[in-house]
Amino acid sequence: MQDFDAIVIGSGIGGLVAGSMLARYGKRVLVCESHTIAGGAAHSFSRRGFHFDSGPSFYCGLTDPRSFNPLRQVFDVLEESIAAISYAPLGHYHFPEGSLPIYADARSYLDAVAKFAPQGAVELQQFQQNLLVLYEALRGIPALALRSDWQLIPVLLSRYSPALLKLLPLVGAIAGSAGSLMDRDVRDPWVRRLIDLECFLLSGLKAHGTVAPEIAFMIGERSRCAIEYPVGGSGAIVDALVRGLQRWGGKLRLGTPVEQILVESGKTTGVRLQNGEIIRAPIVISNATVWDTYTKLLRPEDLPESYRKNALSMPAVESFMHLHLGIKAEGLEGLTGHHVVVHDSKIDITVPGNTCMISIPTVWDATLAPPGHHAVHAYTLEPYEGWEYGELYQQKKQERSQSLFQALEKIIPDLRSRIVLESIGTPLTHARFLRRYQGTYGPAIAAGKGTFPGPQTPVKGLYRVGDSTMPGIGVPAVAASGILCANTLVNSDITAQFL
């Protein structure tokens, strides 16, 4: 007798989507989370009345019915919803030569760009127009229809043949990079750097490493749907997915680290927890990274040697320095919520410390901090290599976080005198609390140099979701990975009821 139909390891967005969708499809599902808080890299945490996002804070189309966001589609299937606050502008990019407001409205955005690069704005308009053509074609096939097996073909042919015909002329763009489209349309160096920055913020790679559909999705959603922040922060999204999981009979166990995926005769039989408990299920879905799944959760002999070696050779995006601050808000009435600071235009934007991302979500949701205060989250890339706990750890934290403080001082000059709470996170923090290999953000798979693998593995009954599977990095992508996996595990007649 199996304890469950499926066990999901990890309650990140990908794992929660896969688990909750399977529960909606009538399966007995257990999600095991090692942390005491659900959500993985998207979880929220609290300190002295301040509520912080641990990861993403930029969202689009969470409540807008026009949105193509897979997460919103999942909420519909689960019969769940969240409250969100719309806002504009989206934020500001701060370069040494000036600050650029980022508007959802295409005309306003191009007018703002034209103040820095008049001809570049004309070229950017053509670049974005080509991406919008791709976005509109992709919209014709909802994420809820996707799966990763042969049943996808009859689904597409029977339900979405007009959309397929639209996509045929765009096959080259779908498989290509945003950089290829940029090379064709954009010559202005300032706008090329702007496009590189937006791709980097999205995928961790610049334009030539980012697949075109990913940036097309961002541009399309940004221009067509509501830009909004979830009331309660990213934790509100996690809470909605947990409610959906439990509403349809699924179970979540927190503080429950899985020690090993059990494999017998080439197929999964369940998991063994760190406390020695064994839970049986014919399906196991790992929301851990590819590196953690194949080196910590499986024995080497459980996978074909060549497959394992190839999978573990996947390059990884570097980890982060994180800065979470509670600050006094007096006199900051005109503050906006999202900022990206590039310190030096002569240095590559991907160099750790040069590009700093900042979110101040209390601009929209004042309940995330005590009255009269703001909650601030800033982060920048940081290599894992060279970090170790020891007598110099605290000193290194202070030194390596200075680029974040300096970035924030461009937004709030008297920042340091306002601080009432300070928490600095390092790649070791990332690795420890999120149980992620070297604290990585995910795989650095450049467009044209490989593809993200699907949910299947060589082990029968073992599947994977999250940012080291198709479609890749980012909240919409990992939500789509959960849909892909869940749909693949049931007959297409079941999924058709929800389209």
Image (cartoon, rainbow, N blue to C red):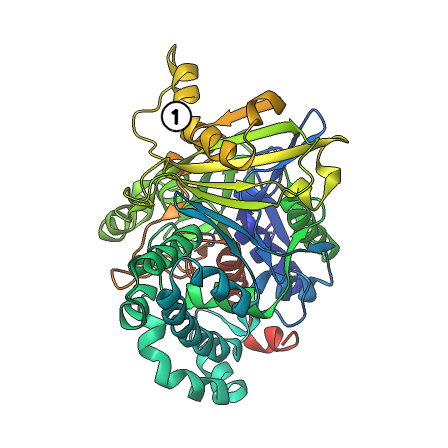
Q: Nearer the viewer, residue 100 or 46?
A: 100
Between 376 and 499, the one lying in front of the other is 376
Residue type pointed to by label 1: Arg
Q: Position of residue 391 (x, y in %)?
A: 39, 10
> Would you say 398 lies left or right of 243 here?
left
Nearer the observer, 196 or 138: 196
Question: Dot 1: few (<14), some (14–19), or many (≥20) neighbours within 10 Å?
Answer: some
Q: Determine the residue positioned at 52% across, 40% down.
A: 358
Q: Report the residue marked by disc 1.
A: 400
Residue 422 left/right relative to 163? right
Figure quadrant of residue 345:
top left
Left or right, 442 with reference to 141: left
Residue 290 in the image: above or below residue 135: above
Above or below 482: residue 68 = below
**Residue sitting at x 43%, y 51%:** 201
Q: Residue furthest top?
A: 391
- Can the viewer see residue 23 in this picture? yes
Residue 339 position within the rendered picture, expressed as x and y whole percent measured from the top left: 52, 45
Taking the image as drawn, is residue 273 in sight? Answer: no
Q: Is residue 295 above or below residue 178?
A: above
How many dots with numbers? Answer: 1
Report the front residue among 207 and 115. Answer: 115
Residue positioned 48% across, 82% down in the render: 156
Residue 120 in which image quadrant: bottom left
Quadrant for the C terminus, please. bottom right
| Residue extending farthest left | 306
Locate residue 46, reporting x and y percent.
Answer: 66, 31
Secondary element under disc 1, as helix, strand or loop, is helix
Residue 91 location (% of width, % of height): 55, 51
Residue that appears at 29% across and 60% down? 208
